[in-house]
Structure formats: structure tokens, C-alpha cells
Amino acid sequence: MTEHSGDEGRAAAALAVSAELRRLFERAPALAVVLRGPEHIFDYANPGYRRLMGGRELEGRRLRDAVPELEGQGFIELLDQVYRTGRPFEGREIAIQLPRDDDGRLEDGYFDFVYQPIVDASGAVIGIFAQGSEITDRVLAERKLRASETRLAGMIAQATVGISQTDMAGRFLLVNDRLCEILGRSREQLLDLTMQQVTHPDDLPTNLLFFERLSETGEPFVIEKRYLRADGSSVWVRNHVSAQRDDAGSIQFVTAVIEDISEAKLAEARQRLLINELNHRVKNTLATVQSLAAQAGRAEDPRAGQAAFLDRLMALSRAHDVLTAEHWSGAELRPTVAAALEPFGADDPARFVLQGPSVRLAPQEALALSLALHELATNAVKHGALSAPAGRVHLSWSVVPRGAHEAFDRLNLVWAEHGGPRWRRPSRKASAPASCGDWPTNSAAPRRPAGAPKACAGTSRAD
């Protein structure tokens, strides 16, 4: 102490007081440095700090000379501020560029540190004690984790399937946007609900049975069930459910990937309906063909009966084409008439006049009417107006509203022939085609659409 005088003596004495602490920092894992005076001269650096600096010579040198890499990073300015104001500075997760290998290349390191002013007996700042620890590994790991979580959150948010996490009581912990769309509820609403509250009551017992087995064995499961939407409607989903465990092996939460299969279920139902409808239509068609074959078998001339049978089958086929274009939901009367009469020149206005309002027929009515019109046109070709060059057919129809005790409106059709040969009483009783009242039908035939008229054809002859 006698070697120093004035301010320098007081500074040295004050710094010497910390010598006991220096011995503690020799074995400490933390970084510790004592800087003296306004030029921040290294008075002490513990082994941890010296290793960080690559073992370079530090004590007795100015900070800016000993660690020139700090120039321009703002840390010398921070030390100046602490020295000038006497107020400490604390940094958390601060990036410092330091040399990490022999080529002098700088890399970011992350540190927690404190700059604490050292004062003498009079309160004057004579140095700075810097203590800290490197947390680079922790910061990089946390950033990597956050980046991974951000990517995962983005994938969950933008997924085309619903994703949820629930606790073991079924309470929603996490839901993505797609699940909100499927259930027609906001995220806030779902996070206040449980899986049990949004599952259709009829599907809940099976779901709970699978959930209980999952909690006991951890075995994942797939289930198809219905969710209840906010508007009360239901939506079919396929849930892929699995359990996530913590380090101790206990189930922490349950994750479900939820696929909306409503369209698939609707298509499945339509397929079943179509198969049943196809079976019904095949039976009806076979019954019709059987009737036509029986009718042809009663003909006196087998060849003529065979030709009539084939013609009637073609008429039936054309009616099927009209119904197929309408997916067998029914058929409009005018296209049905046009298809039935097409072989007889229905598109020639000099031979045919078709007149009437738009009328929707049930499938069986359209088939029966097509065959009836085929018989009328065949007779007109053989014996009626269509057998004469100037002959013509006027087919008109109208709808008579149902009466008080009637279930359907009535469709009246008028077949009128003009310009044909003079009518003569037939020499024998003809075998008339089946009418709409006794045409073969199946007991499983589809009901007539609401409001569709009951179709019956009337005929008349006019010279």
C-alpha cells in the first residue's frame, strides 16, 4: 500500500479487498472479471473467462486491446456507462460475437451477465466487476424447440384434417382451424367443451369403451362416429386416436386426427339405395318383358309376333334412355312422348303435332306410357292416319287438378288421327296392349312423386 499514493492508492486498496473473492472464483464455473479504471484494464480474469478468450494474455491490458472483437458491439459503451453513472447493468441472453477457433472467425455466443460498479470508501467508482455465464447451448436448444413448435403449430393450423388434444377426462386442450370448421364452433367454444359433449349420444357408449381401453393399455384406435355441430346437425368423422405419455410413462394427453367422412357416408347410402332401386327396376323390367313376350306369343303369325315383340322392346329401351338421363328420378312427358314416337316420324310437323304443358311422370308411368304410345303409333301405321300420305296425328294432354277425395291430379291425353282411311269395324277382337291401370308392376315400386299426375291415355279417331 505504501507504493501507491492519492487516487491510485485508494483504487488499488479497494480492488485488493476483493482478493478473497477472487480465490472463490478460481474454482467457480461462472465467468468473473475485475476491470480497473475508466480504461477498463484487466485486474483479474478467472480461469473460465481465460478459456473463453482462448488463453490469451489479459491482466494489465485494456479491454479494447486484449479483446478487440468487442469493439463495435456496444459492450465497451455499456462499461463506460456503468463506470460513469455507478448504476449496475444486467443482461439476459445477450449475443456476443467471439472467436471460436484458430482462424479467428467470430461466432455468436449467448450470455447472462452483470456489470457491477466497484466503489472506494468515498463512493467513487474505481472499477467494474463483471460476472456471468455462457448459455449458448440452452438458447440454441430453446430456439430450436420454439422453431419446431412453430412449424408444428403451422402444420396443425393448416392441416386439411381436424386435430385435437384432450386430457383423460375428454376436455379439449388444443383444436385446429379445420376441426372448428367440421364442428361449426369457434376455438374458444370448443376449449370450453369435452369430447363427450360434442359426440352424438348414439355413438358415445362405443367411443367411451374405446377411450377406456386406451387409458388402460395405451393402444391406439380408429373409430367412425358422429359429432354434433353447433346448429344441431350431425357430421360423420373418422377419428385416429392415440395417447402421448410423459417421461414417467403416464398418459399425458390424447391426440385425435379427425377426418370428415360425411360425403363418403352419403355416397355409401346412395350406393345402397341405387342397388336396391336397381334390383327393383330389374324385376319390373323383367315383368314388362314377360308381358310383352306373352302378348307376342298370342299372335296368329309367329313372325309378326316376333317383329312386334322386338319393336316393343326398342320402345321400352328408348323410355329407359329418357329415364337414365334423369337418373331415374322421373321423366318429363314431352321427351318421353318424343322418344316413344321417334321411329314413327314424331319430328315431322306434317305428321305429328304434340301439344301440352310440362308434366313430370314417375318412372313406371313413363315406361307404361311409352309402350302405350308405341302401340297406338303401330296401329296408326297399319290401319290409321300414318298409313296414308296425308295422315297426321295430334297428341295433346292436360292436367285436371285432383278432387276432394282424390290423391293425385289426373293427366288426360288425347290421341287424335286425321287424314287416314275410313274406319271399319275389325273382323276380330284385337289383343289390346296393357293399359296404365293393369301394366305389370312390383309391390316395391317407388311412390309417385308428390304432385305428379296419375297418367291414363285415351284415344280417339277423327277423319
Image (cartoon, grey):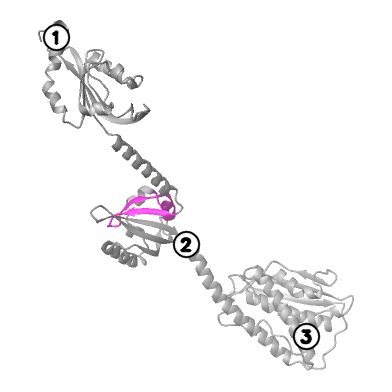
Magenta span contains residue 329 = no
Q: Determine contact: label 2, label 3, CB under 8 Å.
A: no
Q: Could you tell which of marks 2 and 3 lies nearer the N-terminus?
A: 2
Disc 1 to disc 3, how far (Cα)? 135 Å
Please tell me whether residue 154 is drawn above or below residue 262 in the rendered image.
Answer: above
Q: Could you tell which of marks 1 and 3 lies nearer the N-terminus?
A: 1
Q: Which residue is drawn at 82% across and 90% down?
A: 426
Please tell me whether residue 141 is drawn above or below residue 397 in the rendered image.
Answer: above
Q: Which residue is drawn at 14% across and 10% down?
A: 10
The local secondary structure at tag 2 comes to helix
Count how many numbered circles sit on residues in the image: 3
Of all residues, the one furthest to the front in this rendering is 102
Query: Does residue 313 appear to the left or right of 93 in the view shown?
Result: right
Q: Residues within 10 Å of mark 2 (few under 14, many from 20)?
A: some
Kind of residue at badge 1: Gly
Write down the quadrant of residue 355 in the picture.
bottom right
Q: Residue at x 11, y 23 (%)?
A: 20
Residue at label 3? 307
Query: Does residue 110 appear to the left or right of 443 in the view shown?
Result: left
The picture places residue 162, in percent across and down from the top left corner, at 42, 54
Disc 2 to disc 3, how far (Cα)? 51 Å
Residue at label 1? 9
Kind of residue at badge 3: Ala
Residue at label 2? 262
Foreground tag (1 vs 2): 1
Q: How crowded is mark 3: few (under 14 residues within 10 Å), some or many (20 or more)?
A: few
Residue numbers of the magenta segment: 161-186
The local secondary structure at tag 3 comes to helix
